[in-house]
Image (spheres, helix red, strand yellow):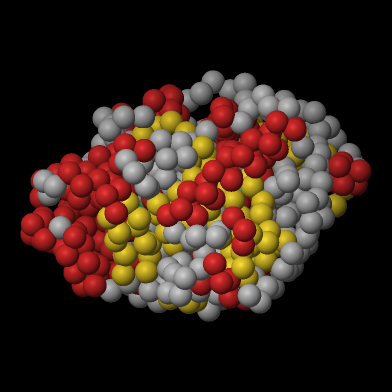
Amino acid sequence: MNLCFQNPVKCGDRSSSLFSALLITSNYKLGTCNLGFNGRVSENRKNIKPPVVTVKSVSSSVLGTVEGTKRNESSVYDAIVIGSGIGGLVAATQLAVKEARVLVLEKYLIPGGSSGYYERDGYTFDVGSSVMFGFSDKGNLNLITQALKAVGRKMEVIPDPTTVHFHLPNNLSVRIHREYDDFIAELTSKFPHEKEGILAFYGVCWKIFNSLNSLELKSLEEPIYLFGQFFQKPLECLTLAYYLPQNAGAIARKYIKDPQLLSFIDAECFIVSTVNALQTPMINASMVLCDRHYGGINYPVGGVGGIAKSLAEGLVDQGSEIQYKANVKSIILDDGKAVGVRLADGREFFAKTIISNATRWDTFGKLLKGEKLPKEEENFQKVYIKAPSFLSIHMGVKAEVLPPDTDCHHFVLEDDWKNLEEPYGSIFLSIPTILDPSLAPNGRHILHIFTTSSIEDWEGLPPKEYEAKKEDVAARIIQRLEKKLFPGLSSSITFKEVGTPRTHRRFLARDKGTYGPMPRGTPKGLLGMPFNTTAIDGLYCVGDSCFPGQGVIAVAFSGVMCAHRVAADIGLEKKSRVLDVGLLGLLGWLRTLA
Ligand SMILES: NC(=O)c1ccc[n+]([C@@H]2O[C@H](COP(=O)([O-])OP(=O)(O)OC[C@H]3O[C@@H](n4cnc5c(N)ncnc54)[C@H](O)[C@@H]3O)[C@@H](O)[C@H]2O)c1
Ligand SMILES: CC(C)=CCC/C(C)=C/C=C/C(C)=C/C=C/C(C)=C/C=C/C=C(C)/C=C/C=C(C)/C=C/C=C(\C)CCC=C(C)C
């Protein structure tokens, strides 16, 4: 079966033929899905009409001056966002509430990217993760809740009592309880001789988390804000600066000696970073290892896809726009500055700033193809490689196959710790219907199973062999779960779709279907991770190939940071040119040390 990710209706034609057919090459009105110029729009923007772009020639050079393309004031947006993943949507909505005029261009039919959804046979499947950090009503780090609130949205959520149930070698079984004390009690019962080490390691995580939670989160590339935070919260900022270049594994080894416990901490890190603890930045580890107990993991009623839908609606309420089936093929440069984008169907749009939610590899390798790769991007690609993609199995099963009290999320690594980072070595499993039964027909559960897999394993196969291989690999993964967790699983399946790295590449437009950036060696914590500005004037990146990396809450933070930096650059926030030059230079230099 060919998996058609995310399509909420049916497996549809994702080509731009519809738009190509509609394309008129001169003086055409740009149709948008929704042009709701209502909401909090300033006086001088209230009467803005849908923009009219006069296009004399759609074949102007992507690399040089945009000859033959006339841009009038009203056709120029404050920002164009390429892609509507959570990173792109948060950047767009945060700018829109600052009264910027934003246009989001999404290749697919619905918003959300990896955080989208699709519906089949009465099931609503989350495309990606169902584990939502940052979705509580507490503190400063609930970035998903805050992003929705900024555009007047709130989703009903269901608290998850157990973040993950680990099933590990030597029959080590650990549940990550919502209550921190319950989790510590369970872990120390398995490793009583390491009680002090456990408390010390997770204690450092809390120190970092509490520092993060005390800050107002904005762009670390904007000096007025950053110096302001250092002035108001010097201890917390110094704590964060101290841990910025450090990794979780090295800190764990200061306190913990038991090799099996250290492997458990590797697994804790692997599920959020796809690498072991020695390669996982301590700030990121602290964020997830504590937020799950502080705000807790909360699942949105109706599925994860509702987050992106709500953000997209909120964006339109603010007077900005989103267009679907809008496949950006290139970024238009004018005298070295990013000024617009060109779509696969030939349409062009212009803006003061361009924000790419495509990965940095796609942005610089495809959307700016032919341009010399800037030094900063070369450095990024030296330090980070593309993490493998996933093989995903979305299934509907008869409810009775799950024992009572089954947890929602599981991580399975059966026999050998060495397999943790191997392709197909470990298995992630989410059963969101444990929390929200409305996602499946009565008497059924959803099982979303995923395991790391590389595109190289799936390329060059004729269609029949590709289909057969999908079935074969999926059957073996299902058998492993049947053996470890749910006897009778194979015979209880009522629906099954299998996606491969090729599916991820096709539907999420991510180079090699990558899950995100992964350090080539041992990184210096987060030091080498680029922020949002790029070497191209007017071009910004957002999403998981920006600081702080993979994860829905992480890309939400990158969206918040990006919006703040862009707002400062287009005059919607305070900025100091002199301080900017100093800070951006310093950060660029620090990255070269990573
Ligand atoms: N890849 C996965 O399987 C997976 C699974 C679970 C969670 N996640 C997490 O989701 C997060 C990713 O969020 P994100 O915001 O960085 O991005 P994203 O990949 O979720 O979204 C990017 C969006 O940009 C669109 N896009 C890309 N190129 C385009 C183009 N040229 N023109 C128009 N649209 C284009 C895509 O269709 C997609 O909707 C990461 O944190 C990742 O860890 C990923
Ligand atoms: C600048 C300089 C130099 C200095 C300064 C200092 C300072 C002030 C600093 C600051 C910093 C900051 C603020 C930072 C921040 C950070 C953050 C927010 C981070 C975050 C992070 C997050 C993350 C990483 C997340 C992630 C997550 C994830 C990935 C998830 C996933 C999940 C999954 C996959 C699921 C699983 C499942 C199963 C098991 C089934």
Q: At 85% from the left edge and 46% from the top edge, which residue is drawn?
A: 19
Is 221 left or right of 144, judged from the image as shown? left
Q: At 48% from the left edge and 61% from the top edge, which residue is drawn?
A: 486
Q: Is residue 126 above or below residue 43?
A: above
Is 474 left or right of 109, judged from the image as shown? left
In this view, the residue in front, 9 or 193, is 193
Quick check: can you spot residue 444? yes
Residue 395 picture location, percent across and down: 62, 58
Q: Is residue 569 above or below residue 463?
A: below
Residue 366 picture location, percent across and down: 62, 30
Quick check: can you spot residue 563? no
Which quadrant, please, contains the C terminus?
top left
Q: At 56% from the left edge and 72% from the top edge, which residue is drawn?
A: 400
Image quarter of residue 59: top right
Q: Is residue 366 above or below residue 472?
A: above
Residue 372 picture location, percent across and down: 54, 20
